Each structure stands twice: as C-alpha cells, then as structure tokens.
C-alpha cells in the first residue's frame, strides 16, 4: 500500500494551472456569451473575504494567484471517494486516510505589464505560524485541516446537512490557507484555485499521454504498510530520458518521494516539470485558443475545481498572456534545515529571508549589491577581468551531466550567456555529484571564474582538463531538457537536502533557492 502521507495531490495545483489557466488564456478572445459558457458551473468560494481584510499592503497592480492541491480522499460533499478508485486504481492508500492537508502550494505572480510569470512553490512541511487556524506553529500544509476541524466543531450543533457542513468547514480551511501563505510570503493573495484528488486524476486523464523527462531511471516499488513499517512507494518504474505517461503513472510521477536524494524537495521539482509539460502539450496541440477543445477540457475540470468568487477568468486571460507562452519560471523557496518537533520532521525556515526573496523576485525590492571583490596580497582585486574578452580569445566550456540531454541543455544556456560551447556528454560522475563543479586547464582560469559564478562555486585547476578548456560537471539537478522545440533551461547546483546556500558574488546576485529553477516552454528534465 502506498504511503498515505504522499498524497497524489501534491502537484494538483500545477495540474490546475495547466488546465484552468490554459483555458482561461485561450478564452481571451471569446465573446461574453462564450465566456459565460466556460465560466458557468465552476464552484465559487467566498474564502478570500477575510484574507483581503488581513492582507499585506499592495505595492502595484500585479496579480498573485495561489494554487492549492488538497490531499483529501473525499468528494465535495464529504463522502469517501470510491475505494476501488483510491486503493486499486491509484494505489494511494485507504479512502479513510489523507485528511485535509494542502500538499501543493504554489503562488503565480503575474506582473501588471503582463511580463514573465514567476511561480514559487512553498514546501509543504515548512514550519510556520498559521493565520486563521489556531495561530500556532504548524507545518504550512496543516492550516487547512486545523481550521476546517475547528469550524466543524463550531457548526456541528446548527442542524446543517452533511454536505453543507462540509462546504462551510472547507471555506474555513481555504481562508486559513490563503491567510497563512500571504502572511508567510508578505504579499497579498488576489485569487486562488483549489482542486482535489479525483480532480487531478480527471485532469491527467483528459490530457494523457503526458511526456516527462528524467535524468536517471527510477524504480519506486510499493512497500506494504505493517505494524513495523509505515509502507510507501508508488510502483513507478521509468527509464532515463523522455517517457509518455498515462493518468495513473502521472500521479505516481508527481507523488514519489522515496528513492529520491532530496525526498519532498525533489518531488517539488517533479511537480513543476509536470505542469510545464502539460502546458506545453496543450499549446502544441492547439487546445489553447480553440473554443471546442477548451469547452471539453472545462467540462472535465470544473466539477473538481474551486475558485474564488472574485476571479473573472476573462480579465485574467487578458492580463496573463505569458502564462501558457512558456515565459514562466518555477522556483522552490529555500529552507534553513530540518528539525524534529513533537515527533514530526519539519522544514525550518527564515520568514524574513523568505519575504525578502519574494519581494526581490516580484520586483518590489532591488537585488542586494554584489559584495566587493576580495583583495589580493598587494591590495589588488582578485575579481575576474571585466568586460569579458572576445569569444575567439576565450576558453571553451565542456559540459557533462547525468544525461547527454541535460548536458546539452546547459551548454546551450551557457552559450546564450556568451561562453564558447564545447563538448557535451552524459557522465557517471555527474550522477554521483551533490554539487556542480567547475574545473579548468591551462590558460582557462578567467573563463572558469565567470562560469563558476553561475553556480555559486569556486573553480579549481584540473590536470584532466585540456589547455584552454573549462569543464563543468553538473550535479543531479532539474535543469530543463528541451522538448520537441528545444526550450532549454539552465541547470545549476543542488545542495541536496541541506539548506539552500547563498550564491557567489556577481553583477546581480540571484536569491538563494531550494535547488535550481525549472523553466516552462518544453519538457524539463528532473530527478
């Protein structure tokens, strides 16, 4: 039996973005009647009302959209999902297990000018102060269930039907989730969308097969729950490279956490990559912009999706044209470490650091100035020369990754930054590396320093590197592999399960993240 804590809904918010947002964007040219056909039948929530009263100040006209993946094995009326569906089709544990954890939380920031969309994943086990729940410290995923349980106790004696009690108590859960997230990030949440377990499956079923890419083969056998073992595993077995998944495999792909170096944190990158792949497919197949196909997709989605009652999908479509155009970058907010509190493993975080990162990424705060270069023995700067010399005078950069595709994608990204491209190949050493390394041969130190700044590492002289060459060995990361139309994204170093580090000094230091970014526009390759 699968580990019930690895709820298949850990990515459901991403699937929601890939369907609701895709349909929304494609609907931007519809007349009002057609728009009403798409919007009609969506379940609407008033849970934003309290959150708006308690929201942090608004700094511009941008829009922040929270996607919520609810790990619940119950339908909208509080009834258990069919046992044969949950246990036999999905291998997702008992229908009685799961609670109301929000195992997927992702904020999409859409700039006022309609530019690049920034997507931030909040790790589900971040230990934060809840707002609208009980006001105490909990894993952020638990705010929904705590508030819902309290509301059920409060409303229990009012003679409500089971379905109405479920509806009203879920509203309390949604409100607490929105309030907790916006307090943690320090930005207001303008809209939200929530989807449940069966919703993810229905969405994946509607768009299957879905292509994904892995840096390495995976084998995640199911281990039965016993008195002495919590059980776990998804049953997923896939080779390295690109695979086409059906809905059940897609669920396993996004919920696997065993046999991954960084567990939940690696799984977050899986979720981001899955969303990118689905949006890419919808665009390639012409679903976006086709009313008939959009209508069929909405007919599947809307029965399982809840959106706030202030969200005008047509207005949103006109504001966010880049969302399905591939101009989206996913990042995972950093943690500072791990700790056991009350018998639970939690992620420790620095709330002020998180808010500073969010302000910087959302354009509300300039990046911190680069540290002054260190002085040499005679007080001279040890910083690399600037500007860079012409390409013909510069060292060649060879890239080795866990797969040839990952190495090629990173080489293309480096070339776009002006680094002369050299050899690319898959390498066993990259599969073992926990951090990206940069070595260099004779005459290539200056180029190596420029390349190393990208990964926040220090280059080292290497006797194995040819003269005039820089050798980059990528860690096991989620650098994107191009899909059929080559949408390469740079990889980077991963600090493993340890806290995210601070990047090395550069012209504009990037904020620290939990692993590298995943960029939409293709089929990203991940662990």
Image (cartoon, rainbow, N blue to C red):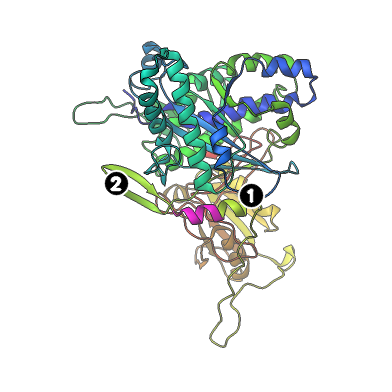
Q: Where residue 447 sits in the image (x, y, percent)?
A: 63, 66
Badge 2 or badge 1: first in the primary sequence: 2
The verdict on residue 355 being magenta is yes
Q: Where residue 296 sits in the image (x, y, percent)?
A: 66, 13
Residue 240 appearing in the image = no
User: What residue did someone put label 1 on?
Assistant: 362
Assign a secondary structure to mark 2. Answer: strand
Name the chief secondary structure element in magenta: helix
Q: Specify whether 265 is left or right of 357.
A: left
Q: Specify whether 2 is left or right of 489.
A: left
User: What residue did someone put label 2 on?
Assistant: 341
* The magenta segment: 350-356
Q: Is residue 21 above or below residue 359?
A: above
How many numbered marks have been drawn onto this rendered protein structure? Answer: 2
Q: Are marks 2 and 1 in contact (CB under 8 Å)?
A: no
The verdict on residue 434 being magenta is no
């Amino acid at each position: 039996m699968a580990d019930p804590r690895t709820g298949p809904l850990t990515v459901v918010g991403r699937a929601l973005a890939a369907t609701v947002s895709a349909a929304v964007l494609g609907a931007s040219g519809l007349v009002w009647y057609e728009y009403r056909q798409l919007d009609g039948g969506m379940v609407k929530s008033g849970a934003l009302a309290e959150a708006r009263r308690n929201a942090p100040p608004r700094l511009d006209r941008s829009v922040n959209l929270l996607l919520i993946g609810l790990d619940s094995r119950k339908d909208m009326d509080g009834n258990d999902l069919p046992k044969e569906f949950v246990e036999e089709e999905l291998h997702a544990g008992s229908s009685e297990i799961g609670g109301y954890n929000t195992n997927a939380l992702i904020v999409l920031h859409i700039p006022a000018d309609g530019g690049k969309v920034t997507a931030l994943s909040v790790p589900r086990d971040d230990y934060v102060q809840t707002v609208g729940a009980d006001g105490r410290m909990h894993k952020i995923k638990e705010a929904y269930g705590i508030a819902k349980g309290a509301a059920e106790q409060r409303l229990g004696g009012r003679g409500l039907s089971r379905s109405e009690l479920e509806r009203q108590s879920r509203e309390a859960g949604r409100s607490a989730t929105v309030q907790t997230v916006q307090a943690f990030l320090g930005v207001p949440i303008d809209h939200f969308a929530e989807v449940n377990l069966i919703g993810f499956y229905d969405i994946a079923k509607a768009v299957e097969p879905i292509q994904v890419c892995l840096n390495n083969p995976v084998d995640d056998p199911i281990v039965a729950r016993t008195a002495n073992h919590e059980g776990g595993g998804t049953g997923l077995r896939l080779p390295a490279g690109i695979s086409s998944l059906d809905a059940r495999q897609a669920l396993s792909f996004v919920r696997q956490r065993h046999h991954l170096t960084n567990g939940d944190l690696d799984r977050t990158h899986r979720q981001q990559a899955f969303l990118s792949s689905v949006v890419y497919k919808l665009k390639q197949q012409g679903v976006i912009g086709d009313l008939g196909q959009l209508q069929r997709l909405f007919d599947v989605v809307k029965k399982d999706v809840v959106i706030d009652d202030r969200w005008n999908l047509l207005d949103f479509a006109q504001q966010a044209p880049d969302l399905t155009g591939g101009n989206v970058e996913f990042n995972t907010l950093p943690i500072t470490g791990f700790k056991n509190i009350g018998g639970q493993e939690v992620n420790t975080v620095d709330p002020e650091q998180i808010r500073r990162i969010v302000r910087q990424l959302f354009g509300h705060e300039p990046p911190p100035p680069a540290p002054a270069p260190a002085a040499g023995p005679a007080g001279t700067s040890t910083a690399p020369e600037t500007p860079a010399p012409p390409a013909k005078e510069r060292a060649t950069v060879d890239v080795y990754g866990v797969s040839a595709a990952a190495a090629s994608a990173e080489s293309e990204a480096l070339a776009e930054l002006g680094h002369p491209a050299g050899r690319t190949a898959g390498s066993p050493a990259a599969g073992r590396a926990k951090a990206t390394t940069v070595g260099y041969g004779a005459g290539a130190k200056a180029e190596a320093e420029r390349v190393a700044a990208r990964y926040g590492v220090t280059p080292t002289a290497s006797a194995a590197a040819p003269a005039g060459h820089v050798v980059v060995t990528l860690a096991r990361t989620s650098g994107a592999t191009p899909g059929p139309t080559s949408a390469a994204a740079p990889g980077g170093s991963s600090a493993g399960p340890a806290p995210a580090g601070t990047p090395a000094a550069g012209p504009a230091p990037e904020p620290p993240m939990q692993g590298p970014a995943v960029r939409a526009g293709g089929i990203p390759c991940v662990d």
